[in-house]
Image (spheres, rainbow, N blue to C red):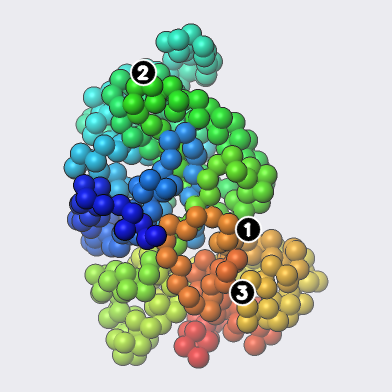
Amino acid sequence: MAVEERIKGEDKHMIDEIVSRMHGYVIRDEHIPWRFVDREAEVWNMVDEEGVVEGGWITVLYGPKGCGKSTFFRALSHAVDQIDAGLDILIVERAGDIQRSILHLPKSLRRLARDITDHVSKIIKISPDKTRALISPPTTYRISQNDSWIEFDASPFHIVNEISYYIAYWYEIDRRIVIVLDDARIDDEESLWRFRGWLENFANIIREDNSVYMDRGGSIAVIALTGDALVEEIRHIVGGKVNWALIWNLSRISSEELVSQMGLHHRVAGELGVGVETSKEILWRLAGGNPRALRLIWERGLKEWLVDEIIGGIRGFAQDLPEDQRGEALEKISERMDNVDDIAWTDPSIWKSMVKHNIIIYIAAAKKISEIPREPWIGREYAFQIPAYYHILKAMAKKRSWEISPEEVIREAMA
Ligand SMILES: Nc1ncnc2c1ncn2[C@@H]1O[C@H](COP(=O)(O)OP(=O)(O)O)[C@@H](O)[C@H]1O
Ligand SMILES: [Mg+2]
């Protein structure tokens, strides 16, 4: 049954209200003048009773870099803050290096900012029932003037653990709490194993914390966001101890809505000397609804984006391959380009490097909270994070050369 049919009455009204508030959210980054688009399906799939927000569980929500994970949760917390949805979203993000974090508090928890800070920065804490004593390093902090965020000298993992503990044992009001760990960066072996250790450990703790808090009528869920396709490597190991969910780039319709808010179709038409309709088509075929890509094109121009991000990204991947295998690698990849899923069969080292460089991502075996479009760059098991990677590899394979110009990439995409 579709989620929309399962949820009725009050709840349905609530979700419509949340989505409409999200659409009023103005993206906070720097100087950006556009509003939040889309994500209705994602909201439904998140808050539905069979959804990914499940008390006592960690959900690893992954998806292409720049597909809008962070922005989604900012818009969602902004929306649920405005209406009383009974849901509180706390966001923990890294501030620069791994030992600094920022905790964003929803309205309902702001009056507790000082209390939370005291709790996190204490050295030894004993739970009210005296069953749990924790020793943590003393932590320094800084609270914003309106108490909406706190900066800690501690890792985001540490902060998530402490907040969960605080809510479970000390928060008296029964709420549905969601703690979002924004951007668990997993770009090398060390961070991958650190993340794995945290998941395995915290999966047990969150169940316990949730059951303590449930006695007072509340629930706590944790969502860990990552854009790193390497996360796939620990999925078999961590497996069913946590939930796995996938979020995707914007749909074609929503991507076009964002493009027109940005006026990007006109800019690109001007840059390339093509018509506006052609320019929309080019944008879809290259950016595939990835909002970060659209934003970079808006800031730098299409060709410069291709050079910096796409040609540069492929160069990084190629340089990671042993030198004597580079020529052959292109050959092997080109044989598999008709079916993206076959990429996994190219050669283990080529395929692993494509995952590590965030060119492709594994998309099976996770609950999909977004609709995944049918496009040649998306298979059933693997997909290119951004279609420009698919076209550039095709163009390179035809040319039998790693050297390519942005014009050649555009030509291949439009072929
Ligand atoms: N739904 C959306 N509507 C409009 N712009 C968006 C949306 N989602 C993301 N963006 C834009 O795309 C950029 C990248 O999104 P972000 O949330 O940082 O991606 P991720 O966290 O997945 O890497 C943001 O700077 C924002 O400007
Ligand atoms: Mg992010």
Quadrant of the rendered image containing residue 44: bottom left
Q: How far separated are the C-alphas under marks 1 and 2?
A: 41 Å
Whether residue 6 sits left or right of residue 381 in the image: it is left
Q: In terms of depth relative to the viewer, which is nearer, 321 or 85?
A: 85
Image position, residue 15 (x, y; %): 26, 51
Q: Is residue 176 above or below residue 138?
A: below
Q: Of the numbered discs in the image, which one, if any, rests on residue 293?
A: none
Secondary-structure class at tag 3: helix
Label 1 sits on residue: 356
Q: Could you tell me which residue is drawn at 63 percent across and 58 percent down?
A: 356
Is residue 371 positioned above or below 137 on the image?
Answer: below
Q: Amino acid at mark 3?
A: Val
What residue is drawn where x is 68% and y is 78%? Answer: 336
Q: Residue at x 66, y 83 (%)?
A: 397
Distance from the alpha carbon under mark 2 to that under mark 3: 50 Å
Helix, strand or loop under label 2 = helix
Disc 3 versus disc 1: nearer the observer: 3
On the question of residue 356 being in view, the answer is yes
Amino acid type of the residue tagged 2 in the rendering: Trp
Which badge, 1 or 2, is on the more N-terminal residue?
A: 2
**Which dot marks residue 170?**
2
Q: Residue at x 58, y 61 (%)?
A: 364
Q: Is residue 17 left or right of residue 368?
A: left
Secondary element type, mark 1 = helix
Quick one: 160 or 407, which is closer to the camera?
160
Sort mark 2 into few (<14), some (14-19) or many (20+) by Cα contacts within 10 Å. some
415, 263: nearer the viewer: 415
Foreground: disc 1 or disc 2 = 2
Pick whichever of labels 2 and 3 is earlier in the sequence: 2
> What residue sits right under mark 3 in the picture?
340
- Badge 1 amino acid: Lys
